[in-house]
Image (cartoon, coloured by chain):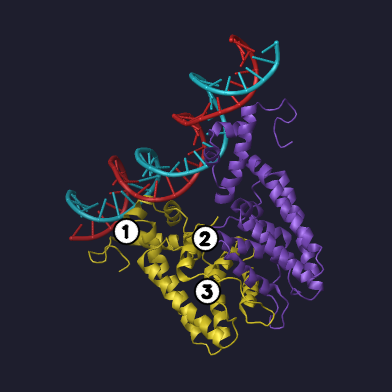
Chain colours: A yellow, B purple, C cyan, D red
DNA sequence: GGAAAACGGAGGAGATCTCTCCAGTTTCGT
DNA sequence: ACGAAACTGGAGAGATCTCCTCCGTTTTCC
């Protein structure tokens, strides 16, 4: 069903072999270079011509959709697992850690999660599943008195967006440097007597969505 | 001395008028669009031809240097003012607030501060003055027991880098939304009994420099 | 063995950006 | 008020990039 010819006769042997090579090469190239990588780069890595890539996949978004549907699904799985934890605060922290960890290893995934224009239906749908889960993770941690009460779930989203910046900057230097910044961020989310009230209202969902849509330097 | 012809005869009246128009237009355009703005855009805003811009300024970096030398100098001034505050923690917080505030209003300044490739000697020199000041602001706050003891000054730098991401994303939506994220970040820097030790060593200065040099999506 | 399917990769088309060139216009000293 | 020198505008050259198509050649499979 991932194949465009699924309903017709199967691909010729060489075609099927190349299709797999392209998918694997695309996985590698997008993970390294992000979704900005050209299909020429994918073709080169796969050892086929660009024409072969374009014959098999209508365009880059279609390829991204096939590749990343599953990976974004993993994020949903992580959220569900963390919702199942007894300790709500630990669940929230663990979610952040594992979600960021997953993205740390894949620049394409980072781009896609924080870049609503790209990808198609499946990726988009998966991303939308995240919102209620994150909101629930936060609400539980707040009810337990562990997370500061004035957080909104968009604050969690912005926190991961900011962490992605740290990852992008440091991935080539020290691949786990992000853990330090995550720890700092988590301490900022914790309920604490010293912390004053947050200034201003949080972003609402639409504002946050627009924020993701905004191109960053 | 800002003028390339300073040692020769003064510019003709129309040339000097256009030079001023270009500088003002460049300030506006770079503040809005960042240092990626084209000199064509600057010329259009100034109401002159591109040729006129290139006749007066050898290239974009020279123009950036003239424009932003002073603005980065303001950052140094802010750091000095905050170093003079009695309350070391308040000084650090105030520095972050004012430094980020200054950058919030000027996308070009954000780009330049966090993008060591661009700009020339003067901008570069001004940026280097920041490092010891930030280190001192942090050390004082740590000695006072207010900032967590395991922070390095590169953590402050990374914090502002991450905040810049938040600003870039939200500037067009709610221009002061960043204050909320700054408050969260500051709470993460505060010494606190709940906070465990930070994982891994901080970035050293060279690593942080390389991190800034790394292109971000 | 031959028709059909697939291949490769040069290159067209379209975006950008930076910066140059020169025919025409403006300034200013005398 | 006039002519030389200074200055102007903006088309467009040149350099990159990226996406995607086209078609002569090769491979598959009945």
The chain letter for the residue carrying disc 3 is A
Quarter assignment of residue B10: top right
Q: Are marks 3 and 1 in contact (CB under 8 Å)?
A: no
Q: Which residue is mark 3?
A: A99
Foreground mark, 1 or 2, reads: 2
Residue B199 visible from this viewpoint: no
Q: Which residue is mark 2?
A: A32
Residue A155 visible from this viewpoint: yes
What residue sits 45% from the left and 75% below the top?
Answer: A130
> Could you tell me which secondary element the residue under label 2 belongs to?
helix
Measuring from the top left, give residue D24's x and y in whole percent: 29, 40
The chain letter for the residue carrying disc 1 is A
Sequence-first tag of 3 and 2: 2
Residue A15's label in the rendered image is 1
Which sits in the foreground, B164 or A164?
B164
Which sits in the foreground, C16 or B85?
B85
Which sits in the foreground, D29 or B168?
B168
Measuring from the top left, give residue A121's x and y in whole percent: 35, 66
Sequence-first tag of 3 and 1: 1
The number of callouts visible is 3
> Could you tell me which secondary element the residue under label 3 belongs to?
helix
Disc 1 to disc 2, C-alpha distance: 26 Å
Q: Are marks 1 and 2 in contact (CB under 8 Å)?
A: no
Sequence-first tag of 1 and 2: 1
Estimate how packed mark 1 is, as few (under 14), some (14 to 19) or many (20 or more) residues with alpha carbons within 10 Å: few
Measuring from the top left, give residue A104's x and y in whole percent: 55, 68
């Amino acid at each position: 069903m991932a194949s465009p010819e699924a309903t017709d006769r199967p691909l010729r042997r060489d075609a099927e072999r190349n299709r797999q090579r392209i998918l694997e090469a695309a996985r590698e190239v997008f993970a390294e270079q992000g979704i900005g990588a050209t299909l020429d780069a994918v073709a080169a890595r796969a050892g086929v011509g660009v024409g072969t890539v374009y014959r098999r996949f209508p365009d880059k978004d279609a390829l991204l959709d096939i590749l990343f549907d599953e990976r974004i699904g993993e994020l949903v799985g992580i959220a569900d697992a963390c919702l199942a934890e007894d300790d709500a605060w630990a669940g929230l922290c663990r979610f952040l850690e594992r979600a960021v960890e997953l993205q740390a290893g894949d620049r394409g995934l980072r781009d896609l999660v924080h870049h609503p224009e790209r990808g198609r239906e499946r990726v988009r749908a998966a991303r939308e599943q995240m919102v209620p889960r994150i909101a629930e993770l936060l609400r539980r941690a707040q009810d337990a008195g562990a997370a500061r009460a004035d957080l909104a779930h968009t604050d969690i989203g912005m926190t991961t967006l900011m962490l992605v910046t740290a990852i992008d900057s440091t991935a080539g230097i020290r691949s786990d440097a992000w853990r330090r910044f995550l720890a700092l961020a988590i301490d900022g989310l914790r309920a604490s007597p010293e912390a004053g009230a947050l200034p201003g209202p949080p972003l609402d969902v639409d504002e946050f969505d627009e924020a993701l849509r905004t191109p960053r330097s």
